[in-house]
Image (cartoon, rainbow, N blue to C red):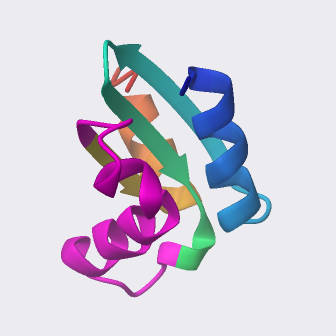
Amino acid sequence: MVTNESIQQLLQESFQGAEVSVAQSGSKFDVRIVSDEFEGLRAIKRQQRVYAAFGDLITSGAVHAISINALTADEWKQQSRFGSNF
């Protein structure tokens, strides 16, 4: 069974030193990943890197949908400053 904790661990292993938050509703996951690995990457490249970490979980159907918020530390600070929690 896929849990918030298993998704969080998977993403932390894929993005060393990243801050990861996960919210789940059934087999749909909302993830926020804050990592400077995203510096200089456009949104589509960031999402592709995150999707790559999910691999078999998506093809097996264990994870039905993912909403991704992939940010650098500076972007997260800016977003947090204006009250965005996720």
Residue located at (36% from left, 63% from top): 51
The image quadrant of residue 40 is bottom left
Q: Position of residue 24 (x, y in %)?
A: 40, 17
Residue 36 versus residue 17 in the image, above or below: below
**Residues in magenta, as a range:** 38-66
Q: Is residue 33 left or right of residue 25?
A: right
Magenta residue check for 54: yes
**Residue 48 placement (x, y as % from top left):** 31, 74
For the C terminus, which image quadrant? top left
From this viewpoint, which residue is outermost toward the bottom? 40
Q: Is residue 53 above or below residue 57?
A: below
Q: Residue 37, located in which quarter of the rendered image?
A: bottom right
Going 43% across and 19% down the picture, which residue do you hit?
23
> Can you say whether 84 is above or below 40 in the image?
above
Q: Position of residue 79 (x, y in %)?
A: 37, 39
- Eyeballing the image, is 14 above or below 8? below
* Residue under the point 31% across and 13% down: 26
In the image, 70: left or right of 36?
left
Q: Quadrant of residue 1?
A: top right
Residue 41 placement (x, y as % from top left)? 35, 84
Compare residues 69 and 77 and report the one nearer the observer.
69
Asked whether residue 69 is drawn in magenta, I would say no
- Residue 15 showing in the rendered view: no
Query: Is residue 26 among the parts visible in the rendering?
Result: yes
Residue that extends furthest to the front in the rendered view of this protein: 60
Camera-side residue of 68 and 42: 68
